Image (spheres, grey):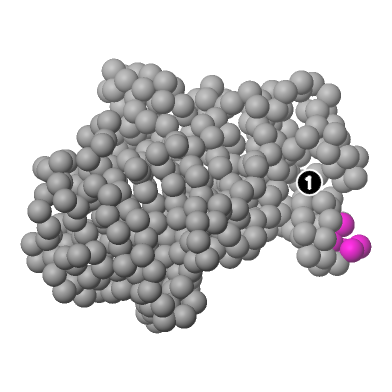
Amino acid sequence: MTALICGLMVGMGELFSLDNPIQNYAWGSYETLAKMRGVPAPTVEPEAELWVGAHSSAPSQALVNGQFQPLDQLVEQNPGRFLNPDRDHQSFPFLFKVLAIEAPLSIQVHPTDEQAQAGFEDENARGVALNDPARNYKDRFSKPETVIALTPMRILTGVRDFKELKAIAQLFQLTWLQDALTLAKTPKQLLTSIIRLPQETALAALEETLAAARTWRAKEGEVPGQESLAAGLVELILLIDSKYPGDWGLLVALVMNLVYLAPGESAYTPDGQVHAYVSGTAIELMNPSDNVMRAGLTSKHIDREELIKILGENQDHPQIQTPAPLSSVAGRYQMWDERLSVTHLTLETEQEVVHPVKGLVTALCTEGQLTIEDAQSSFTLTGTQAVLYVGREASLRIRGKGQLYLAAQE
């Protein structure tokens, strides 16, 4: 990334180059992010997430006065320069990610702001260290999130309609699921009963489920998952078993909505919603929080009772959204907060467009080569590279050929 001129008068708007860290989680890809940034693949370690933001665990590095510096430190030292002029708090307002998913992520739930505040203060009072692996609440914030598919994706979110679950139980002759559905009246009650299964009962249910899936596969063969309800379930069950053998989080996954997203489609996950991403590559915008309660498909700490406490009563199927068109090259996704948005720009030829920005904006290139300029600065971006704009309303000139995603707080 090259900068021709860097630095503006504070208050008039500034454009900064960002260098963004990669997280090497086990479920990540050895090729996706490497190919995006144009380096040899496969990589030595799996690369799961690219982070753009000021999260203290892995902040972006901002080019300021000719040197790259951690964005979280810059925000702390000079919030007036690195945060939205119209902010209502003194922290960076979101975390922007690219997800490269080769294995299902853990099944998880995030708390509301009130639950996070209470949980954080309780663990502090009990002397649970922030770096303790058994700590549930790492901060005081909720973690709503929206995922936007870059490739075909599979996600698990919420709980299937009970009529559909009864049909599944009958189709695969799953006595454990029939019993659970007989007792449960709400999605939360169903999830609670599964999460609280005694170990011996859960393992028996797991074996029953795997045997049913293997029998179906032996009879029907490898039918693409989107061809039928049964095919999708069998594909999911066998995938989870191959990645997480013996993990009874599979039983939770079975009762969740299995959603297929086409490139460009998005889904929102509210606080209290059980969810997991299964496969694909995506953009994600979220509150910058680390508060995660897990229900399975992980080697990390699981606190079943705390997870049950923060589960929402309603576990609805998400509304699938596409961007509202702004122009022939731009579409906008609205987020859970009316001040937040993600705009997608597609430049298919060597062309130039002018895009308005204001407040705080991170612009991330996922493909191609794009040059972004304001009146004083110019940066050329390739895959995984980004810039940060902070200031009052301005216009950015964008030229080249590629894909650009802009996360904004106005």
Residue 323 position within the rendered picture, expressed as x and y whole percent measured from the top left: 56, 53
189 sits left or right of 298 in the view: right
Disc 1 element: helix
Q: Is residue 362 above or below residue 397?
A: above
Q: Residue at x 68, y 55 (%)?
A: 260
Q: Is residue 12 above or below residue 193?
A: below
Residue 349 position within the rendered picture, expressed as x and y whole percent measured from the top left: 47, 80
**The N terminus sits in image quarter:** bottom left
Residue 359 position within the rendered picture, expressed as x and y whole percent measured from the top left: 29, 45
Q: Residue at x 38, y 74 (%)?
A: 352
Q: Residue at x 22, y 70 (%)?
A: 378
Residue type of the residue flagged with mark 1:
Thr
Judging depth in this view, the residue of 369 and 272 nearest the camera is: 369
Residue 337 colored in magenta in the image: no
Q: Residue at x 47, y 29 (%)?
A: 111
296 sits left or right of 205 in the view: left
Q: Is residue 287 visible?
A: yes
The segment highlighted magenta reads 216-220
